[in-house]
Amino acid sequence: MKRRSFMISAAGTAAGLALLPRLAFAEAGKIDVYFTSDQNVIDFWTNVVKPKFEAANAGIALNLVDGGDSAGVQAIAERALAALPTGADPQSDVAEGFDTRLPNGGIEAGLWVDFAAAGLSNYSKINPLALDIPTSLPYRGSQVLLAYDTTKLDPANVPKTWPDLIAWIKANPGQFIYNRPDKGGSGGNFVRRAIYEATGKDPSKFTVENYTQELADASLNPAWDILKDLSGSLFDNGAYTSGNTQSVQLLSQSAVTMIPAWSDQALSAISQGVLPETTGLVQLTDLGMPGGFTKIGVFSNGVNKDAALKLADFLLTEEIQSAVLTELGGYPGVSWDFIAADLREKFKDIVPNSIPVFPGGNWEKAINDGWYRAVAPNVDRTAA
Amino acid sequence: MTALPANDIVGTKSSRRPTGLLLVAAPVLLVCWLIIWPIISAIIRTVWLPDTAGERRFSLETYQFFFSDQYSINNLMVTLWTTAVTALILLLICLPIALYLRFATNRIAAYVQGLAIFPMFVPSIILSYAFIRVLGPNGTVDLLLNAVHLPHIRSPYLTPWGPVLGLVWDNIPLTVLILLSGLGNVSNQSIEAARDVGAGRIAVLWHIILPRISNSLLVAVSFTVLGIFSAFTLPYVLGPAAPEMMGPFMQRTFRDLNDPTTAITQAVIAFGFCIVFGLFYVYSVAKNRAP
């Protein structure tokens, strides 16, 4: 059994290598940035932010680390919080795309730098719509829009309002799919747009604080009815993909004609050829689908805190904010007045003046659980 | 396996020093610390709940909720269904492969073995996306069928069959290796002897080979069942939104719904099913070690 003993020893060696202890120490002058965002954002940092920042600040380097998702970066933040009382090195400086309300007690303990008091020269340029809490610095936004196949759907006939969209989906059964609301923002914000539709298209009705069981029942149940009514006309009689990327994949395989997609993800998919050139993008005009701003947090106990604050200020410069528009396909975190005039002119049609932002917290939990219980199962998938 | 001291190491003679026991002490302690204790702590946390005043008291309400909630029961049922179907298909596919590898003597066997082991080196997340490309809607299979004017098949992607197909492919290497090691116990002489007295292929398989490898079959089934029951990536990416398998369901309850107590309850229930197969495995190993 030579073959097998070779297999076993090879596997053993590989496992052994993986288990070797790997020690890491934060280096002075090397900012450790942990990401929750997808690969396209990390690519943007690698190709745009990192070279520009390092060129402008000799002696400072960026170390970009994919933290996976919010829970992954939360583990890093908890490590920093644990290191706070002892003054130990948390080996982390910046958390990208992370809600600094987490981990619990972090803000109270002074884990995060308060940007309002940090004296950043560009802080006043931030779009007031994007400001949330002073420990989170918004540097880019994105919004969910509809991506569709122009070879199957003439851009002249594309639905531009919610009622038109519903009518189109029902008239073209099997040609639309959105992902499960907890597995990615594109489907999640499509679901939230349905909630707005069911409650009179007024985003100001929902705030983190005003969540009550009664309000949730009154506003979510009608939305579930809209979505349940829609499910039979979706791809494969009510299938839901498990993430933004899988929806894009189905559109690229021409299995469906239209999906909700993140503006930045759709634009970079088109530029990389993942989606064909013939992909069209459209935003609903009666009320846009929600989006959000992505923020960074800076650890107050990071070894490179001062350099990290320089980086935070650098992110808000016109150079980077314009690149967010042109290279990443995102929306700037600063007000539109601080964007190059030609870009302002070029993008004025696709960028709306308001991006509805649906609150998180208890609302998110109620939407995720409610959708799984009310919308996902009540479909007869075997129906023709 | 190392946790069970074999008779020849510990010995029954009083003159033996407890060296053997010391040798197994480290893994046993590790198992107690990292596995046994978390299980006990999980069970305690789900039955010893705080009431409205914050006082902890004994209560089975999380379990009552699980078993009275149709949504949770559906998820459990689809997990059991997926596990049973996948284990059955695995045995049907892997037993012939293992038999072929055991008795073939030519060069091709090496390639077949390589091919059978290959899935072990493919991360399941890559497998999932490849699956969507190949078996998904308008995937390779669809295009090939279309090219020869065969009807369009309904893709298993996002149906309960998606995870089944993915898990079968993913678990082939382990199952084949376990069955192959069991087939090593079947001596060529006993098969030749059976052939000499006129036994056909089926008779040899049924009366000579299967009784010898029943132990390996049990081990293979236990291993795959444990793996499939707790599978996460493949059901997450390939399965339907509802009902979902216990792995994604637990993760979603824990993270998205921020409800650790319910998630732990689901985990304890899943553990309850898995322990049956764990005991099967321990039983078969212990039987093997008996003199």
Image: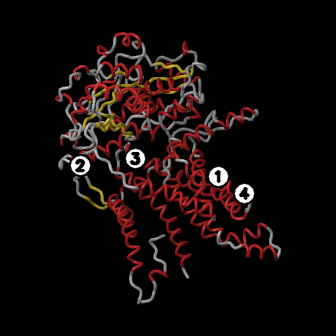
Depth check, front residue: A33 or A255 = A33
SS for dot 3: helix
Residue assigned mark 3: B253
How many other residues sit within 10 Å of disc 3, few (<14), some (14-19) or many (≥20)?
Answer: many
* Callout 4 amino acid: Arg
* Callout 1 amino acid: Leu
Select label 2 or label 4 by which is in front: 4
| Quarter-of-image position of residue A150 | top right
Select label 1 or label 3 by which is in front: 1
Tags 1 and 4 touching, CB below 8 Å: no
Mark 3 or mark 4, which has the lower sequence index? 4
Chain ID at mark 2: A
Chain ID at mark 3: B
How many other residues sit within 10 Å of disc 4, few (<14), some (14-19) or many (≥20)?
Answer: few
Residue assigned mark 1: B115
Chain ID at mark 1: B
Same-subunit check for callouts 3 and 2? no
* Callout 3 amino acid: Thr
Residue assigned mark 4: B107
